[in-house]
Amino acid sequence: MRASTSPVAAVLSAALAGAMSTPAVAAPSACGGVPEITDAIGDGHHQNTDVTAAWFSEQGGLHAVIRPRTATLGPVHEDSEAAGFALLFEVDGVRRYVRAEAPRAGAMRFDHGTWNGTSFVSAGPTTGAVESGPAGAVIIDVPGVAAGTRLSRPFALTYDGEDAPGVVHWVDRAPGGTSPAGTEFGADLVVGTCALAAGGAPAGATPGAGGETGAGATASSPGSVALLAPRRVTGAKTVQVTGSVRPASGGVRVTLRAQARRTTTRTTTTAGDGTFVVRVPIGETTKLRATAGGLDSQTLTVTVRSTVRVKVRRAKAGGVIVTGTVRPNLPGRVLWLRDGAFSPSATTTAAGGSFRLRLSRPPRRPLPGRLHPVRQSRRAVHLEHRSHPMNRSTVIAAAVAAAALAVPATAFAHGSVYETTARSVPSPAPSPINAGDLVTQKRYVFANHGYTAVFRETNGVTTMGAVNFAALPSAYRNQAGKTANFKEAWYAEGATGVQVHATCQGVAALSSFENIGSWQGADPFYGYIPFQASSAGFEDDPADWIPVVKAVTGVDLETVADPAAACAGLGGTYTPADAFNTPPTPANPLAPWTALSSSTIAEETEKAVAPLEDEITELQAQVASLTTAKAAAETATKEAQALAKTLADKAAAAEAASSAASAQLQAASVPLGIALGAESFSVKQLGAGVAVKISGPAGEKAHVRLLVSDATRKALGLKLRTIASATTTIGADGSSVTLKSSAKGLAKLAATTTVTVDVSAGGRTVSTTGKVTR
């Protein structure tokens, strides 16, 4: 929708007049603050054309906004003339686009048109702008779209020059991978409903070059559907998927499609505030899309990571044997990779969720931390298990250490926070130290994912910290019929003051309950969005929150050198995490929650391994002998199987021939017979039909004829002797047919004429005679 008062269009007039630089403005926000398109960071191979989010905005007109990873919008390839950014969408079945091109020199170019499946067909120029700042965006005015028009199946494409004349070098497709032919799409949008969602009247539109008119939007019909789900889970899980329709409306039927090896659907209805919740069991990487009121949400992909457990033992023949299990149980290959290697040291295939590898020459040097199995599923699931660094003598210790650290995990399936106080000596310490000098300090015992740590309240923020699930029993949390707003109450009812990550306080987008919940699973544990690029060490993954921060604020935590300055730029206050009571050290990064000594593990492992050394020589000889015997047995088995197949084929052929011969003999043993219903009949009866009775082998097809002599044929002027015929299948009790003749000249027959009736079946023919009278 284009409005003549568009502030973006006003700023862009200089560009259309041929200015050498493109005007910079702030990107208008998405409807409801939720982009129609989000995409993984890094799937585009150039940062400046790697799309992280894209959306439509109705602020002062209809605009398409594309946010790449960085703000440098020119081409990266030295031989490229321009980099392109396009947002594509369907209107009434026609795929349209708006596009911006950033040439190597000169101002940005903006156009619109249609997409034919492989290339852009321009319909003319439009206007646009570039957002300034570290997190850039391209803003393109969308012409010729009226209020009420449905924009369906949107996606963004970027490119950097051409690989060859006419062959575009595609960089990113959002959502999805790289190819324009992808099957993932953003959320549909009905133009004009953004104002309805905000409580206003439908936004007007000024028709552009296309001059379309819309049917209009009402508060009772959805204008868009938003969907939230975890981006990744470990192991098979039932995932809670949440969403909402805008404008908010209760009782709207929502269908959620979950597509993996097979597609399943679940239905629900929205609550009064337009939100909905669906629980979906997911055991492999799955694509999710919701439909409500004929509108589709964005396609979301939930990636399933396997848990891989390994056991290592020495083989007497030399080397080591690695056995392991993979959950969920999906088919795939297992690769054993060493640090820095591109080729695996050993490969096998997981079968029934288990695998076995033999490493013939284990290194005598310390094994690097990246010696791990990587499982690449045939179902497009990439799963891996990374071990801690370990020496050759402590290969088996990997499983021991993992088990030791994982013991508390079952006790803390959901995180718990316990508050206490302690007294400490102030700094600088007075002399002497009296009881009144001691300072009371709040402390938190923080437990999550099997780790336990003690934090001191040091950052001054005592609300919206980690959630204490000990105050939120599962029976209370999992009540049926509760709306999504019910979960927001958890942050108040179970909130504590401990922040284990740095945060940016005072920024509305980072304080939104919807955004806080979007980077976490079904039971959100943190009452904030971290504002740091690294993990706190509690199996928290920065890849979960970094895209959320990028999408809602434009700040890329992976590239920001000064998070405090970036937070200040958003109008917020940068707040570091509360301090560890026992800070981690590089030598022992798990110091706050474990005192397990690696040297102790090595000593105990060496004791366990030593007795196995005596068996190595004996097992080497046994393995060599068994390998030779196994090869000979396999060869003999294959030869026997081939001979057995040949004999079986011959026996089957002989049996078929015997059955056919038996059938022929049986048929030949039954005589073929024919009889007339009357020995003589008149010409008139011949025209009405003469009854013939047939007997013979049941099931055989019989052909019956009524013939005159050759002399009679000539006398009557007929071409053929046959004057009537019929075909039938002989039944168990024989068959009857009626022969009717309409041959001309039968009235010329002699007073009494002899005719022949014959029947042919199974290669045999029998006949009888009758007389025709006038």
Image (cartoon, helix red, strand yellow):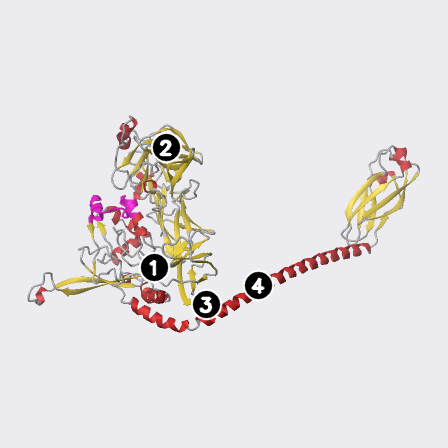
C-beta proximity under 8 Å, tags 4 and 3: no
Q: Nearer the viewer, residue 183 or 31?
A: 183
- Marks 4 and 3, how far apart at CA: 22 Å
Are there few (<14), some (14-19), or many (20+) residues within 10 Å of tag 2? many
- Please, what is the three-letter code of the amino acid marked with disc 3? Ala
Can residue 491 be seen here? The reply is yes
- State the residue position of label 3: 317
Q: Position of residue 464 (x, y in %)?
A: 23, 55
- Please, what is the three-letter code of the amino acid marked with disc 1? Gly
Residue drawn at x 86%, y 44% is 757
C-beta proximity under 8 Å, tags 2 and 4: no
C-beta proximity under 8 Å, tags 1 and 2: no
- State the residue position of label 4: 634
- Marks 4 and 1, how far apart at CA: 39 Å
- Marks 1 and 2, how far apart at CA: 56 Å
Q: Is residue 325 left or right of residue 21?
A: right
SS of the residue at dot 2?
loop
- State the residue position of label 2: 145
Residue drawn at x 24%, y 60% is 585
In the rendered image, the vertical position of residue 635 relative to residue 342, given as above or below: below
Q: Which residues are magenta?
A: 548-573
- State the residue position of label 1: 369
Name the front one of labels 3 and 2. 3
Q: Is residue 333 left or right of residue 528?
A: right
In the rendered image, the vertical position of residue 299 relative to residue 8, given as above or below: below
- Please, what is the three-letter code of the amino acid marked with disc 4? Glu
SS of the residue at dot 1?
loop
Name the front one of labels 4 and 3. 3
State which tag comes first along the sequence, 4 or 1. 1
SS of the residue at dot 4?
helix
C-beta proximity under 8 Å, tags 3 and 2: no
